[in-house]
Amino acid sequence: MGIDVANYHGWSGRQVSPWRACAAMVRVALLQVFRRKSYWIVLALGLINFFVAWSVIYAVTQFQLPRDAQRELLKAFGFDLNPASGAENGYIMFMQRQSLIVTILLAFSGSLLVGGDFRQGALPFYLSRRIDRRHYIVGKLLAIAAVISLLTVLPALVLYVEYGMFTSSVEYWTSQWRTVASILSFGAVQCVVLGIMLVTLSAYLQRTAPIAITWTSAFIMLRTMSGQLREATENDYWDLIDPWRTMRFVGRLCFGGDLEGSERELAWWSLAVLATACTAALILLVRRVRAVDVVE
């Protein structure tokens, strides 16, 4: 049978950049997550924290209290909107409170978004097209970043806009305009660190159970070890082995909080630790993807 009879024909359209495949991977990843009804429970839990913060801000701003009184009431609920307040920064604390939900969602998303490509042979299908290994890696990292942003960055930006709207003044937006860049910076830190770690872990373990157990155990174990070693040795540098604590220190750098002495040193050491860990994980990920045989 000839090619024409089989209805095959050459491509006559304009070829686009293979980098556009990264956007397709993000779209497919979000569709995969939202199609799983079991994930809706996890997303709903993340929205509960957001709605609590949203309700507190709404209630406080409607009391028509002075700005200082509003901030004191918000502090009582653990949400200080002043980015210069350092450890009590409400946006950092809100994004950190979402960490448990993010950890659970990523633990079960790793196999769905990455591990299945290796286990079911989808990766050779990707790489046999114009998509090469760098496009695949970037696309998967962006997909994980999109999932993280839905639970951290986007809600934090909504809270920032909400407070400016309900105060009946643009003073908060004009005086704290750097907050948007700080939220995006801290969100980028979380997306890069968690994305690289999860994609690398999923590429090697592939199945849901090993990924979920290893992922959650690592965070719980390292946090527990960090606290015990810090108390036993009275050395705050043991906090550097706790991923969430190191990201919070880097977040305070992003927000320009008041860091003094050892806290500032810990923040910069945290940045160095995260950069080293991400570099090592990225090297392992590249080696794993390169090991896949592709027939072009």
Image (spheres, grey):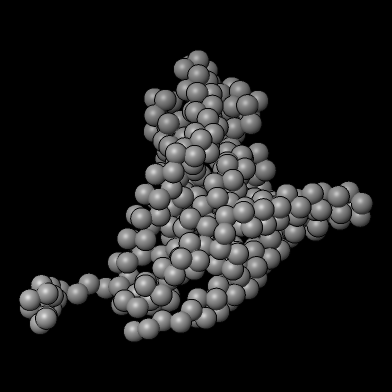
Q: For residue 133, say whether it is visible.
A: yes
Does residue 47 appear to the left or right of 89 in the view shown? left
Q: Is residue 50 left or right of residue 99?
A: left
Task: Say which of 27 and 57 sits in front.
Answer: 27
How many numbered circles are shown? 0
Indicate whether 177 appears above or below 78.
below
The residue closer to the viewer here, 136 or 127, is 127
Give how far across and how far down residue 217 sits, in percent.
Answer: 71, 52
Q: Residue extending furthest top?
A: 63
Residue 119 in the image: state x and y as whole percent: 50, 66
User: Residue 147 location in percent, x, y?
Assistant: 46, 50
Q: Residue furthest right?
A: 232
Q: Where's residue 215, x and y in %?
A: 65, 55
In the picture, which quadrant includes the C terminus?
bottom left
Q: Nearer the viewer, residue 128 or 139?
A: 128
- Please identify the residue farthest to the front as the structure is shown: 1
Can residue 72 be seen here? The reply is no
Give the residue drawn at x 31%, y 77%: 130
- Residue at image point 43% right, 52% down: 146
Residue at left offset 59%, top offset 68%: 204
Residue at the outermost bottom position: 296
**Relative vertical location of residue 112 with respect to residue 66 in this rendering, above or below:** below
Which image quarter is the N terminus in?
Answer: bottom left
Q: Residue at x 39, y 33 (%)?
A: 170
Asked which quadrant contains residue 23, the reply is bottom left
In the figure, residue 126 lies in which quadrant? Answer: bottom left
The reply, left or right, for residue 234 in relation to residue 78 is: right
